Amino acid sequence: MKKFTSIVLAIILILLIGWVLYEFILFFQETEKDIKAALIGVFGVTVAALCSHYFAQKREMASRQFSQKAKAYEGIFDLIFEIMKEVKAENKMTQEEMLRRMIAIKRDMMIWAGNDVLKAWANFESEASKGDNANVFKSMEKVFRALRKELGHRDVTLAEGDLVKWIVQQSDHHMVDEQMRKR
């Protein structure tokens, strides 16, 4: 019923706007040149002011969101680098600490991340839970690329696997390359 009501209201609104435009065109055709020029000037100034205000607000909001995204994404990178550091040192982060940090990251991602980041992270978690035969490096690369894309980086000159190679040991680069070749 709500959908039907919304459709009827939309049709009424479209008809009303059409009628107002029709009346304005009739009025505009009957007026003198001086009045037409003044109306066009006022209309142009009004549209320019509205557009300028709209785009300024959009830029301001994007700027605020960018700083929050950058902070949230920094937390993701911090966790991944810390996990890799502990793996290399053969230390283990406690389950409670890992859970606490993952919840904080997911909260931030739910608020600030775009669709590509959310999908890449879900894929990464799925691959990481599979065990030894998972494509963890490949899914991690997708997360890194999605995060960097949202932060404004264009990684077109980087080959697949280059970002993950930053966090793995040189001796593991062959495993990264192998996973990147898999489809």
Image (cartoon, rainbow, N blue to C red):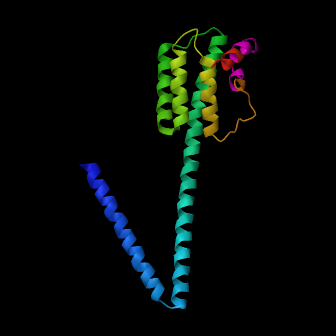
Q: Quarter of the image holding residue 176?
A: top right
- The residue shown at (26%, 49%) is 2
Residue 94 lies left or right of residue 14; in this view the side is right
Above or below, 54 relative to 136: below
- The residue shown at (54%, 45%) is 65
Q: Position of residue 91 (x, y in %)?
A: 61, 9
Residue 81 lies left or right of residue 42; in this view the side is right
Above or below, 10 relative to 137: below
Q: Quarter of the image holding residue 158?
A: top right
Depth check: give the residue in front, 100 or 4: 4
Q: Position of residue 57 (x, y in %)?
A: 53, 58
Instruction: State how many labels appear.
Output: 0
Is residue 169 rendered magenta in the image?
A: yes
Task: Give the prevailing secondary structure in the magenta stretch.
Answer: helix
Above or below, 119 relative to 43: above
Q: Position of residue 16 (x, y in %)?
A: 34, 69
Q: Position of residue 26 (x, y in %)?
A: 43, 82
Depth check: give the residue in front, 23 or 123: 23
Give, as a single range, the part of the protein colored magenta: 163-176
Is residue 172 rendered magenta in the image?
A: yes
Direction left: furthest residue: 1
Depth check: give the residue in front, 62 or 46: 46
Q: Classify the position of the C terminus by image quarter.
A: top right
- The residue shown at (31%, 64%) is 12
